[in-house]
């Protein structure tokens, strides 16, 4: 349990989807596991809509109980009682002054023990309002305790639309808050198997000598969803799959797969290594990009009739460094595909001087399934049991559900919110990291925005455009398990 003395968590954009579906349920689970002591924590929702405390509580109630239904109802009502609501617009001095007053009221009345006040502002809002909201927080709502404490802001992606807009946003916020106060969330960094990457890579002798261009043929990082963009077509159309998934979630995963061993586990050391990976990415070659748009995407009334926004993309990134020169990193993401899955597939080179015809059965492959059903498994060739001396491909399988029965794997948001309370920035994106991430994708994004590259149509429920599979195959990827 973190050392909390008096913590206010303020969810801005409290009536929005993200707050309802992710932020409040994550706060509830932290609360019910004892990470948010009720006499030291209070939670505020802030948004434009004029509603009562109870109305907000009712709205979030359904998401909290449906999420993990085992929670005792007593916990739910105790948690909901901690939640208060303040309404105001995102650039109104009045609204934020009122918010500050409400926070202070709680701090003085409820947190009777002497101690520092801590204020965590969670911006579950579109980035267009970040500058004004941050200005208002800075001006009216900072922690004022003489006994120390802190004010932190959590910002969601998309953090900008390209290099210039992201840099502008970073400067605007950077003038108001120190880097140590800004938590740029990428919820993929809170996923169990993404967090395990560091351990997998650097705590296992098995992998250390193999993890390089001499042994690895290609790495594929895939995100698939089996539903489309219905209900959020307006947002999605402005951003597209590269900004929504690849530039952030998949690129962050790539950094952890490809980085060198950090000097220590200190957040700065880890983030330094991630930046080096990003800096080594070569400019993207248009020949190594396939875009797709599912048939029916434009039927959504919030999507323009002639939209060429990709809902699918395969992009190959190449790293110019000693470890990875020549190894393609195939990043692939798509909406409305045949399954919901996120995984990393590391394919090894063929065995030199092979005497068993292993190639026929498939090559060695190491797979990390981020979701669903977290697992790590390894495809390897074994002797077919029996009298004949033939070989077959089999698996060494570490399936989390079987191996760790009874252990609840926390939601990414739960873990990341706890990190912000603890002041641990390891799993958050640093400003320079974000800048290089945008630098990698901005030229391609501009070409797409200018209509210089168009998506191939694909059927919902399919694997995506056939051209994408052809591109992956050309890069050396051998399809296994149907993936
Ligand atoms: C979000 C994207 O960041 O991640 C969504 O904006 C996507 O489009 C979601 O659906 C996927 O998250 P997860 O955790 O369900 O894989």
Image: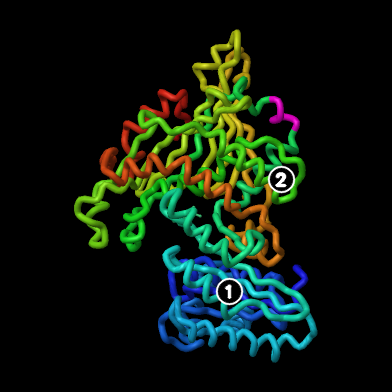
For marks 2 and 1, the one nearer the N-term is: 1
In the image, the residue with mark 2 has its CB under 8 Å from the nearest atom of ligand 1: no
**Is residue 452 placed above or below 68 in the rendered structure?**
above
Query: Counting other residues with Cα less than 10 Å from the Cα at mark 2, is it few (<14), some (14-19), or many (20 or more)?
Result: some
Residue, far left: 305
- Which residue in the structure is indicated by mark 1? 138
**Element at badge 1?**
helix
Q: Give the quadrant of the N terminus.
A: bottom right
Q: Which mark is residue 6?
A: none
Is residue 287 toward the left or the right of residue 475 in the image? Answer: left
Place of residue 178 in the rendered image (x, y in percent of width and height, measured from the top left): 63, 62
Residue, far right: 114
- Residue shown at the point (76%, 75%) measured from the top left: 148
- Residue shown at the point (54%, 74%) measured from the top left: 11
The answer, for residue 91, to whether it is visible in the render is yes
Please give the range of residues in magenta.
Answer: 205-209
Place of residue 312 in the rendered image (x, y in percent of width and height, measured from the top left): 36, 43
Q: Give the quadrant of the C terminus.
A: top left
Tell which of 64 and 134 is nearer to you: 134
The answer, for residue 65, to whether it is visible in the render is no
Q: Quadrant of residue 83?
A: bottom right
Is residue 89 toward the left or the right of residue 451 in the image? Answer: right
Whether tag 2 and tag 1 are in contact, CB under 8 A, the answer is no
Place of residue 388 in the rendered image (x, y in percent of width and height, measured from the top left): 60, 13
- Which residue in the structure is indicated by mark 2? 269
**Element at badge 2?**
helix
In the image, the residue with mark 1 has its CB under 8 Å from the nearest atom of ligand 1: no
């Amino acid at each position: 349990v973190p050392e909390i003395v008096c913590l206010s968590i303020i969810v801005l954009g409290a009536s929005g989807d993200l707050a309802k579906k992710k932020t409040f349920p994550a706060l509830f689970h932290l609360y019910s596991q004892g990470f948010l002591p009720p006499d030291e924590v209070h939670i505020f929702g802030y948004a434009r809509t004029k509603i009562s405390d109870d109305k907000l509580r009712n709205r979030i109630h359904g998401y909290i109980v449906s999420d993990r239904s085992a929670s005792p109802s007593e916990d739910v009502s105790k948690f909901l009682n901690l939640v208060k609501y303040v309404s105001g617009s995102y650039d109104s001095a009045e609204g934020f002054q009122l918010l500050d007053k409400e926070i202070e009221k709680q701090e003085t009345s409820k947190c009777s023990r002497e101690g520092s006040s801590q204020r965590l502002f969670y911006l579950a809002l579109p980035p267009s309002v970040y500058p004004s909201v941050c200005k208002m927080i800075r001006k009216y709502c900072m922690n004022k305790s003489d006994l120390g404490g802190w004010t932190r802001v959590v910002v969601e992606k998309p953090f900008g639309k390209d290099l210039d807009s992201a840099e502008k946003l970073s400067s605007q916020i950077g003038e108001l808050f120190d880097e140590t106060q800004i938590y740029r969330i990428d919820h993929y960094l809170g996923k169990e198997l993404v967090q395990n990457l560091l351990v997998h890579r650097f705590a296992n002798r098995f992998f250390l000598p193999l993890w390089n261009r001499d042994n690895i043929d290609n790495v594929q990082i895939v995100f698939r969803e089996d539903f489309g963009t219905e209900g959020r077509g307006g947002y999605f159309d402005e951003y597209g799959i590269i900004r929504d998934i690849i530039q952030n979630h998949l690129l962050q995963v790539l950094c952890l797969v490809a980085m060198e061993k950090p000097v220590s586990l200190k957040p700065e050391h880890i983030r330094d290594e991630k930046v080096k990976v990003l800096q080594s990415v070569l400019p993207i070659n248009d020949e190594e990009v396939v875009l797709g748009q599912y048939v029916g995407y434009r039927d959504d009334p919030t999507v323009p009739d002639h939209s060429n926004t990709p809902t699918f993309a395969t992009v190959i990134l190449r790293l110019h460094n000693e470890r990875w020169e020549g190894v393609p990193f195939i990043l692939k993401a798509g909406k409305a595909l045949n399954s919901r899955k996120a995984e990393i597939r590391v394919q090894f080179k063929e065995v030199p001087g092979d005497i068993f015809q292993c190639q026929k059965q498939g090559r060695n492959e190491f797979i990390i399934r981020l979701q669903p059903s977290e697992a790590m498994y390894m495809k390897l060739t074994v002797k077919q049991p029996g009298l004949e001396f033939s070989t077959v491909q089999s698996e060494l399988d570490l399936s989390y559900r079987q191996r760790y029965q009874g252990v609840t794997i926390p939601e990414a948001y739960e873990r990341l919110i706890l990190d912000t309370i603890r002041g641990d920035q390891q799993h958050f994106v640093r400003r320079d990291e974000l800048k290089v991430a945008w630098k990698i994708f901005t030229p391609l994004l501009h070409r797409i925005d200018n209509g210089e590259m168009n998506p191939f149509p694909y059927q919902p429920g399919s694997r995506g455009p056939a051209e994408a599979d052809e591109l992956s195959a050309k890069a050396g990827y051998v399809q296994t398990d149907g993936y």
